[in-house]
Image (cartoon, grey):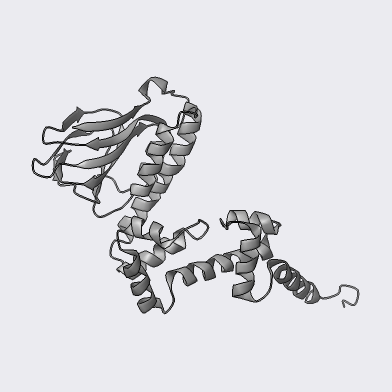
Amino acid sequence: MREEIYNFWHMCDSAFPLNVIMSGISYCDKNYRIERHGEELYSFEYIIDGNGVLEINSQTLYPQKNDVYILTPNSDHLYYSSEDHPWTKIWIVFKGDLAEYLFKRYLPADTYIIKDCNILSYMNEIINISSARDKSYSELIDEVSVMLLKIVLHVKNHLEHKMLSAAEQIKLCLDVNIENRLDMNDVSTQLGYSKNYIIKLFRETYGITPYAYFRKHKIELAKQYLLNTHLNINEISVKLNFADQHYFSSTFRAVVGISPSEYRRGKNKTASQTIPSSSNSC
């Protein structure tokens, strides 16, 4: 059995809305077995590979590859790996008012396992944050809080849309990441489908490639920022995670036919021309 563990229990401060107790990766063996009773802790544990058993509050569950299981405060729980195919899992243990709020606001009560819910990219980022040597505990808490919110929302959306087709799952992934920098490798990692399968299925279903769809809708969002905010071109470029302002402008021109500046000037001119003059009012 081998584990990579990052321990922060000695840094916990009740003044923080969230405290991270531990995070890590466990390469379990047949002897792996954890039992707790009534502790004030939350935990997300994502199964990278393998099988095992979770007994929690009179439920017996069988987390396996690509599943998430959740441990909640005051629960009686016991979990252990199978003998023939033990878990490899990545996990975080935490507590605090923010954790309580997120769980009560977004997740159904008494939900302890989410099947086929890939949160590996978020969990890997938590491990990266945990292992950084140049961060204060306060900085770590801020960054982990953001990742936990993303996990909770991902799990919530997964539970609400678990009946979506594969094509609909791909579209949802593109839509919720519209302000982010995203490529097909990211989508493949999040959904567990191959990149070629994603491109083929999406084109067959929607008549457009995922890349073209994502670019088109990102530019539609850029139009809204140009029309309805005072953000300059570079700020919009940064907000939408383009590589730089030049790439944003060239992409915008390729989709719309004019530059972002020309689009903003043209729409503002049209709007001003439609405002009636007050000097001749009756």
Name, please, the residue furthest toward the right: 279
Q: Quadrant of residue 232?
A: bottom right
Residue name at image x 65 percent, y 76 percent: 257
Quadrant of the rendered image containing residue 103: top left
Residue 249, x across and y down, in percent? 65, 65
Name the foreground residue: 159 vs 91.
91
User: Residue 83 is drawn in which quadrant?
Assistant: top left
Identify the residue shown where x is 39% and y is 51%: 153
Residue 199: in sight, yes or no? yes
Q: Is residue 170 above or below residue 190?
A: below
Identified at 31% across, 30% down, the residue is 5
Q: At 53% from the left edge and 71% from the top edge, which residue is drawn?
A: 216
Where is residue 277? Give x, y as percent.
Answer: 86, 74
- Residue 113, horizontal then vertical, whole percent: 23, 47
In the picture provided, is 258 more to the left or to the right than 278? Answer: left
Q: Is residue 237 above or below residue 29?
A: below
Q: Nearer the viewer, residue 105 or 16?
A: 16
Q: Is residue 94 left or right of residue 141?
A: left
- Front residue of 183 and 19: 183
